[in-house]
Image (tube, rainbow, N blue to C red):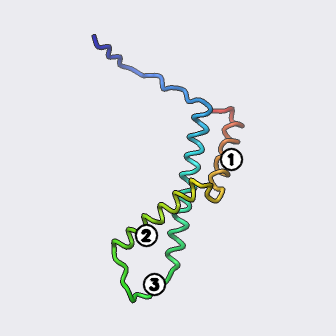
């Protein structure tokens, strides 16, 4: 016999460790996005001579490479932005009673 219960279900309550892990992952994702935008802005400042036209494939490759640079940079400690974000949000959560 199949039991089909309809109605609101209780979501599992996240533990402190899982909340900290999720918070740290979110902070790292924000730092990675910041690094990607920084690299993109830096690339925009480079002048191209126009002697050799840049193809769409080359632009796509450069974007993917920059994405990988930012991802690796963030995973290996980044620039400290993720740590600052994590600490500030954690302090606010702790002062608000742990939500």
Residue at point 72% right, 37% down?
95
N-term-proximal mark, 1 vs 3: 3
N-term-proximal mark, 2 vs 1: 2
| Mark 3 lies on residue | 48
Secondary element at tag 2: helix
Q: Is residue 88 left or right of residue 7?
A: right
Task: Specify few, some or many for label 3: CA neighbours under 10 Å numbering under 14, 14-19, or 20 or more.
Answer: few
Q: Quadrant of the N terminus?
A: top left
Task: Specify few, some or many for label 1: CA neighbours under 10 Å numbering under 14, 14-19, or 20 or more.
Answer: few
Secondary element at tag 3: loop
- Percent of width and height locating residue 78: 61, 58
| Mark 1 lies on residue | 88
Q: Quadrant of residue 63?
A: bottom left
Front position among marks 3 and 2: 2
Above or below, 2 relative to 55: above
| Mark 2 lies on residue | 62
Front position among marks 1 and 3: 3
The mark found on residue 29 in the picture is: none
- Percent of width and height locating residue 19: 59, 36
- Percent of width and height locating residue 26: 55, 47
Above or below, 71 relative to 9: below
């Amino acid at each position: 016999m199949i039991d089909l219960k309809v109605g609101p279900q209780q979501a599992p309550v996240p533990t402190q460790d899982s909340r900290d892990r999720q918070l740290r992952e979110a902070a790292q994702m924000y730092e990675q996005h910041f690094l990607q935008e920084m690299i993109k802005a830096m690339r925009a400042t480079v002048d191209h001579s126009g002697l050799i036209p840049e193809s769409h494939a080359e632009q796509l490759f450069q974007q993917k490479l920059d994405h990988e640079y930012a991802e690796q940079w963030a995973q290996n400690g980044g620039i400290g932005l993720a740590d600052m974000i994590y600490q500030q949000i954690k302090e606010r959560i702790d002062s608000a009673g742990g939500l």
